[in-house]
Amino acid sequence: MLMSGTEVLAPAFARGFAVPAYNISDYGMLTAALAESEAVRSPMIISIHPAEWQLMGDEFLASVRKLAEATSVPVAIQLDHGATYDQVIGAIRLGFTSVMIDGSLLPYDENVALTRKVVNAARPVGVSVEGEIGTIGPRDPQTIEEMNEITYTTPEEAAAFVAATGVDYLAVAVGTAHGVYPPGFSPQLKIDLVATIHDAVPVPLVLHGGSGAADAEVSRAVKHGIAKVNISADMKTAYFARLREVLADPAEREPHDIYPPALEALRQVVRHKAEVCGSVGGADHYSVRPLGLRTPRWVGAPVLEH
């Protein structure tokens, strides 16, 4: 069932579980993540970063929509870390049902203005918007010192940002980072900060950097207001590590022999993350009419730059 991001997150937010958002980079990852989510009856979000979008091309998004529409669990398709207004509009025209505009590295007033502009464009066509306040550090930090670049979200700024922009959900900086953590570093989620921000804002909160964080801490954060958990590195690491193992055998030459073990490793991560998020069986709590019953009229309009 293809839905907007708001439709997918609303039951999770109300019932105290989180929806896993998996960064997808190829067709195999897509089908494996969807299949395992169906197997455990978990809603999910297909998250596509601009770099992944560029790799796969516009045409791939037609397949993403088609498969999401046919899936028996609630699914949203989200642009992850959209960088510009034009990029977000291009994603909406391609059929994304949720978009993130990441202005977190901009001065606060510029972040507000850009995010509000995206909300004003997306809301009339039923597309949900995620914003971000605070910074989560560099992608794939190489040293522990780089982790000190995190600027934590404050409840006061989060409340003001939501009120000023009208975002549907908010990514917050509470102790995690994007990508793979440097050796020797273990992220410590500030659960009290999550709870305080949750009390201050009326919208679901998003945890980026869900890979690498301790499962128990992620589960605790979910109980205190996190309704969407972004997962990329853990899933891709398992997938490519298994591929390398299989390819180490020179006798393995055929894709139908090489890929299934890697896709099974990915499915195991998807199952585990659904358990951590408390979303196993969560699909049974949805009764919203899916967007996939009719392709919106804006889908297929000319696409702007990625």
Image: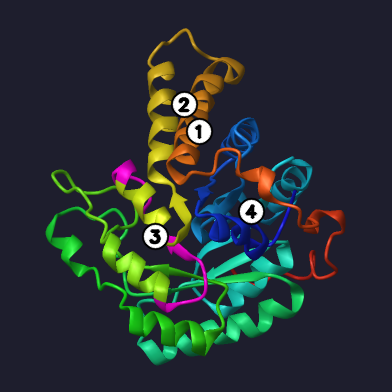
Residue assigned mark 1: 271
Horizontal arrangement in the rendering, residue 191 relative to residue 269 (left or right): left
Q: CA distance from mark 4 to mark 2?
A: 26 Å
Q: CA distance from mark 4 to mark 1?
A: 28 Å
**Range covered by the magenta-colored residues:** 200-216
Pick the front one: 281 or 189: 281
Mark 2: which secondary structure? helix
Q: Amino acid at mark 2?
A: Ala
Residue at 42 percent across and 54 percent down: it is 222
Q: CA distance from mark 2 to mark 1?
A: 10 Å
Q: Amino acid at mark 4?
A: Gly
Main secondary structure type of the part rendered in magenta: loop
Residue at 40 percent across and 31 percent down: it is 238
Horizontal arrangement in the rendering, residue 177 relative to residue 26 (left or right): left
Mark 1: which secondary structure? helix
Q: CA distance from mark 1 to mark 3?
A: 22 Å
Q: Position of residue 134 (x, y in %)?
A: 33, 74
Residue assigned mark 2: 265
The label on residue 57 is: 4
Q: Quadrant of the C terminus?
A: bottom right
Q: Position of residue 88 (x, y in %)?
A: 60, 72
Horizontal arrangement in the rendering, residue 301 relative to residue 220 (left or right): right
Residue assigned mark 3: 224
Q: CA distance from mark 2 to mark 3?
A: 30 Å
Earlier-in-chain disc, 2 versus 1: 2
- Which residue extends farthest top? 251
Nearer the observer, disc 2 or disc 1?
Answer: 1
